[in-house]
Amino acid sequence: MFFIFKASITLFTLPAKAKINIKTLSLTYPSDSGKQALTLSATQLISLHLFLNRPSGEEPSPDPLFGPYISVLPRDFDSHPLTWFVRQELTLSTVMEHNLLRSMPHSVHSALSRIATRFHEDWRTVRKYMPVRVGSHETSTMARENARSHEPARDAGFPMGMAQRFSPFTLLRYDMTLTKSRGDNLSLCPVFDFANHAWTAPNMDPVNLESEGGRWRDPRGSRGELVCVSTMEGAKDEELFITYGAHANRTLFVEYGFINDVGEDDISSGVYPGEVDVHDVMEELIESCAVASWIKSTLEDEGYWGYDNTLRYVILLEAHRI
């Protein structure tokens, strides 16, 4: 930051039209009205837009609306596990990438494989939609070349536009100001996007959404903008951090490409709550109950089935103890 700030002050407000999401892109990418109508999900739509407007070399992005934002995003993601995985499938991986994949614990490799499967499903859907858009949309030279391929882009350009697939980006998940579909409530946000993750004591936080009648909605008068406030005092030139979520290190690694840097003292002292992977236990518990099929289908629809069920140790406050 360029100034000293106090706790609980508004650091910045991002207008709704500055976000990249299913609302701001819907006019540019209308739904297919053919016999086999094709509607892209939020992940697919945002990924397609990033792919078509990805800068070539040192050129700026050709996107007239979000170009300045897209131009400052990373140009490649060679250090991301999804890149290694896709390159290995295309027999293009380096020795180092091959060895890193081989050295992963089985649970981590399985989680990465599931992300790659979702990526390929998204890629096939976008490929069906892309011919019309590539012909009528101003795109970068790199995007036009990659669009001719029926495989994922061989330089991993498209996979890294598909990152959760927006992995390398700070994605505002469950932006409940958008649609009734939880899976489409995703936004990429300038400024907010460049905040790094801190597993403890983040100094910036987006304003919480309000709940009314069991449904989440915009805080009154916000008009869908993103408001970020400080959670503590900060000094000039201090970096701003947010917490991406209470994810297991496995999830952070396969989705974002990093893990929490935690020392033994942090765990033994209770500063870091630790994590226990219990997704197999949870699946067995759910499958044994009377409404198993309903619970499973709901979790599958929301992308939670069989993925990232983590038990964490947290000391309860006095008021929560019996």
Image (tube, rainbow, N blue to C red):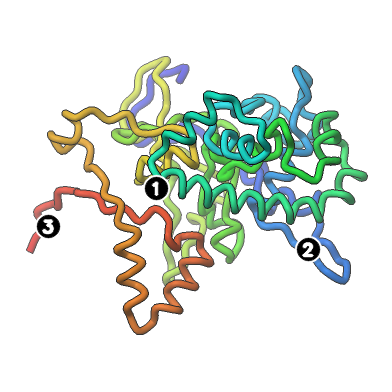
Q: Quadrant of the C terminus?
A: bottom left
Image quadrant where residue 206 sits: top left
- Position in image of residue 262 (x %, y %): 27, 30
Q: Residue furthest right?
A: 135
Viewer-nearest of discs 2 and 3:
2
Say which label, 3 or 1, has the lower sequence index.
Answer: 1
Q: Is residue 2 left or right of residue 316?
A: right
- Position in image of residue 163 (x %, y %): 59, 41
- Position in image of residue 302 (x %, y %): 51, 63
Give the residue type that dot 1 points to. Answer: Ser
Residue 239 appearing in the image = yes
Distance Cα–Cα, label 2 vs label 1: 34 Å
Image quadrant where residue 204 sits: top left
Q: Is residue 164 left or right of residue 280?
A: right
Q: Is residue 32 left or right of residue 249?
A: right
Viewer-nearest of discs 2 and 1:
1
Question: Disc 1 designates what residue?
Answer: 107
Question: Disc 3 designates what residue?
Answer: 319
Say which label, 2 or 3, has the lower sequence index.
Answer: 2
Question: Disc 2 designates what residue?
Answer: 38
